[in-house]
Amino acid sequence: MQAKEYRPDIDVLRAIAVLAVIFYHAHIPFFSGGYVGVSIFFVISGYLITGIIKRKLANGTFSFLEFYENRIRRILPALVVVMVFFAFLYYFLSMTEILDLQRSIRRAIFGLANFFFYANTDYFDARAETMPLLHTWSLGVEEQFYFVMPALLFYVTLKAKQPVNVIKLLWIIIGCSFLFSAVFIFYNQKFTFYMLPARAWELLLGSMLAYTNWTPASQKGKSLCILLGLGIMLASITCYKTVLFPGFWALPPCLGAVLYIAGGTDYTFSNKKNIIHLLTNNKILVFIGVISYSLYLWHWPVFVFYSTFPFYKEITPPAAAVLIAVIFFISYLSWRFVERPVRQKPFFKNRKVVWSLALLCMTSIFFMATYMRYGKLYDNYTYTRVFFRAVPQTAAAEAKTPVDFIFIGDSHCGVMEGLFQKLAEKYRLTGIMNTQVMKNAVMQYTDRKKIQQNTEEWNKLTEDYKTYQSKNLFLFFRYSQKLDGKDRYYSQDARRPLVYLPDKNLTPLQGFTQSMRDMIEEALANGVEHIYLQSPVPEALDYIPNKADILHMLFDYTPEQINAALGEKETGYEERNKKVFEVFAKLKNDYPQIEFIDIRPCLLNTETAQYAVMDEKNLFYYDDDHLTFEGSMQFYDVYDKIFARMAEEKAR
């Protein structure tokens, strides 16, 4: 995007924004708020795009076709190359990740990626770490702005029956969008993060600056604007960590960008060695700004590829340095051989060529992401994923229908269904399953709908007790996650803590303990006599199906070597679950009805002091922490004794 006169200071601002984002994703110290770089990009885009539209409307040369041709030349070529590159990642992703990637590609190619990621993930969640196109949500926001803004300005400038004060109109829209973002973030943070209505004010601040042409009259005022703008942006980049973003907290970096741009409208200082001039014309930063689009496109896929091949690795400082060098190298090639030729060569300035190639590329990418299916490597080992169902599994009957057992928990409960089904059939016992969150406790969410959903899940358990009566209760949860909120135990980034809703002031450990007591007390009050607590399931180092096959096919790893590479060590397991076992000990001491089920010996290799993730033929996990049917069957002998005892007691 070029303004009427080239401004190197804006390329410096682009460099600041893109470096902030890259360093944030590389976990570089002091860049905990680097994600605000996207908001800075929004201000720049609003300023430049609106300046182009305003100028062409004023001299009568504005053309929608020309406007979108320029956007296609700017955005599409490098994006298409990135998407084609993803085709080669298929072998290194799980089937779920492939399907997510294909779905995100189909949206991103049409500028709708933010809709997909709003519906399927949270930018700050662990799952987002494996989605190579996550960063294209911001392109979606910008592209949607490019459709709305030209039409709005064209109408109010040339087609409105009565004169419209564009500046007042922009202020009204900015105010409405900002208030919406600042308030609605407490109800749905994901929407305010991903969607244009809550982000429009950031782009429109740049638009307002383009329309008002505001800048301080004096050179000192301009210098102050630049320094103040830089200070505000850098403070946001370095200090933001746990703020609720965007909402109100997006305002400081956006205002910083506005001040910087406004102060740089005249950078011809009398003294060329002036610090402001040296900064806003720094050749290195200017060049980084020039290739910033390619840097933004390539940085996230490189980080994702590193973290998924051949198994999960934290981005350490040395790794970050290497990865950033790789990102710059690839981005330079992308800019040099893709971006620049398409924008400069006469061949690509032909309107028919632009639209024909755009249609061809978009159609090809869409079909590739819809029908392309690689033959997966996963035929070396067998695994069966258990898809659990909500309760009740038997038809509703009169109140207090007797059943032999109830087993409740989260997804770690659900994967035991196949094993319980076999044992129930063997001993002719009946039971029901309830997969729910922990009683009265929830992982930290700002989304009220999510809290309401979890509350409804708690109520299901109470309703089950009104309908079913049993003497035996099994509890299965991913307990460590309830204490540290991590979706991957081997990640150093903390996630959502547990919140005990009746008293939010309780610590995660206190909330976890109280939640367990709530479920036990409710069970005992409804006639349960035996409560079985299973020890936590060991967790693998990474997603097992694809990583095991990659290690086998590409590196000729044996099952023993795969277990050594991907299995959790016994010492790590004990440390991770230390507090869990302490809580279990207290509960068992307080409630004699509790019996502890230790499944650790079933997977532990005593020689290596490491837990197995597979045997010669079968995989025990379908991701990094959920058991396959074959994995749960490793506990068969342990549970067979319990079911035999239940059958014997029933026969008395």
Image: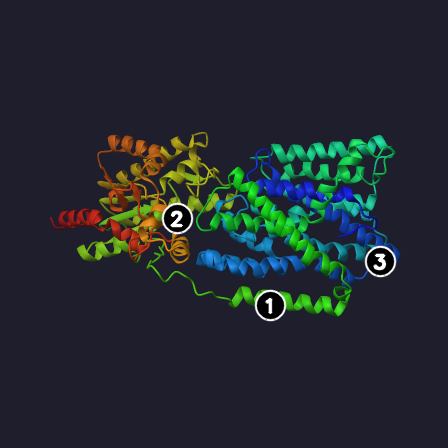
Q: Earlier in the sequence, mark 2 or mark 1?
A: 1
User: What's the amino acid at mark 2?
Assistant: Asp
Q: Along the horizontal axis of the image, is 337 left or right of 425?
A: right
Cα distance in 3D space between marks 1 and 3 = 38 Å
Query: Between 471 and 634, which is closer to the camera in this rendering?
Result: 634
Label at residue 364? 1
Q: Say if residue 201 shows up in the picture.
A: no
Where is residue 228 shown, x and y percent of the image? 74, 32
Q: Along the horizontal axis of the image, is 448 left or right of 135?
A: left
In this figure, which residue is indicated by the disc labeled 2? Answer: 624
User: What's the amino acid at mark 3?
Assistant: Leu
Q: Residue furthest front?
A: 556
Residue drawn where x is 17% and y is 55% of the image: 427
How would you rate the neighbour count of disc 3 (Cα within 10 Å): few for under 14, some for 14-19, many for 20 or more? some
Q: Earlier in the sequence, mark 1 or mark 3?
A: 3
User: What's the amino acid at mark 1?
Assistant: Ser
Label at residue 158? 3
